Image (tube, rainbow, N blue to C red):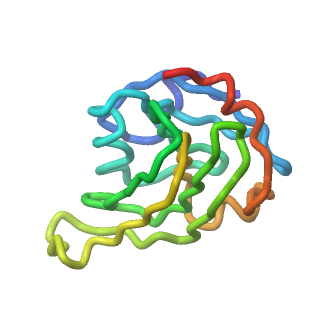
C-alpha cells in the first residue's frame, strides 16, 4: 500500500491530500480524496504521470449532475461516475489530455450524475474490472 507522501510524490501533484484505498474487482486503488470546492477544482491539473491503480476521488455534497472540464490536465484519464451507494453509473475511457495552450473551446469535458467521481490513468478502469454496474463499496465510507 502507498502512503500519502509517496502518492503525492508519485503524482507530482500540487495537492497533498489524504488518500483512501478502494477495492475494485481486479485491484486495490489508492486515491487522493478531493472534498472541498478548491480541491475538486484543482483536481489532477498539471499532473504528469499516475502510477497504475492510483488516482483521485472527487466527493460531492449531494448526488447531482456534475461536469468535469479537463483544463491543464496533462495526461489522459478514465473518469468513473458513481452513485451514493457506490454503484458505477458511467465510465468515460481515455478522456484526452490538454496542454496549457489548448484553447478553451477545445478542452474536453464529461458530465453525469454522481456523488463520487474517480479519475484514473487512461484504460485503468477496464484493467481494474470497473464498468457500469460495478459496486465500489469503500466509497460509501467517505463523508463530506
Measuring from the top left, give residue 63's x and y in whole percent: 53, 41
Vertical relation: 74 (above or below) 93 = above
Vertical relation: 139 (above or below) 11 = above
Q: Is residue 8 visible?
A: no
Q: Quadrant of the N terminus?
A: top right
> Taking 119 as reference, is 37 left or right?
left
Question: In which quarter of the view is residue 115 placed?
Answer: top right
> Taking 65 as reference, is 88 left or right?
right
Question: Residue placed at 50% from the left, 60% from the top?
Answer: 112
Measuring from the top left, give residue 86's x and y in whole percent: 71, 40
Vertical relation: 64 (above or below) 111 = above
Q: Is residue 68 visible?
A: yes
Question: Residue placed at 48% from the left, 22% from the top?
Answer: 144
| Closest to the observer, 28 or 84 | 84
Measuring from the top left, give residue 81's x and y in whole percent: 58, 53
| Closest to the observer, 42 or 48 | 42
**Residue lying farthest bottom?**
106
| Closest to the observer, 112 or 102 | 112
Measuring from the top left, give residue 127's x and y in whole percent: 76, 62
> Taking 70 as reference, is 96 left or right?
right
Question: Residue placed at 38% from the left, 54% from the top?
Answer: 48
Amino acid at each position: 500500500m502507498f502512503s500519502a507522501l509517496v502518492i503525492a510524490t508519485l503524482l507530482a501533484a500540487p495537492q497533498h491530500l489524504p488518500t483512501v484505498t478502494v477495492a475494485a474487482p481486479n485491484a486495490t486503488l489508492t486515491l487522493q480524496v478531493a472534498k472541498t470546492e478548491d480541491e475538486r477544482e484543482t483536481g489532477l491539473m498539471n499532473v504528469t504521470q499516475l502510477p497504475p491503480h492510483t488516482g483521485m476521488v472527487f466527493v460531492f455534497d449531494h448526488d447531482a449532475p456534475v461536469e468535469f472540464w479537463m483544463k491543464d490536465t496533462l495526461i489522459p484519464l478514465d473518469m468513473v461516475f458513481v452513485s451514493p451507494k457506490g454503484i458505477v453509473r458511467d465510465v468515460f475511457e481515455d478522456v484526452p489530455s490538454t496542454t496549457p495552450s489548448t484553447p478553451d473551446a477545445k478542452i474536453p469535458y464529461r458530465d453525469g450524475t454522481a456523488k463520487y467521481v474517480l479519475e484514473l490513468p487512461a484504460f485503468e478502469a477496464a484493467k481494474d474490472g470497473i464498468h457500469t454496474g460495478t459496486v465500489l463499496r469503500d466509497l460509501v465510507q467517505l463523508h463530506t
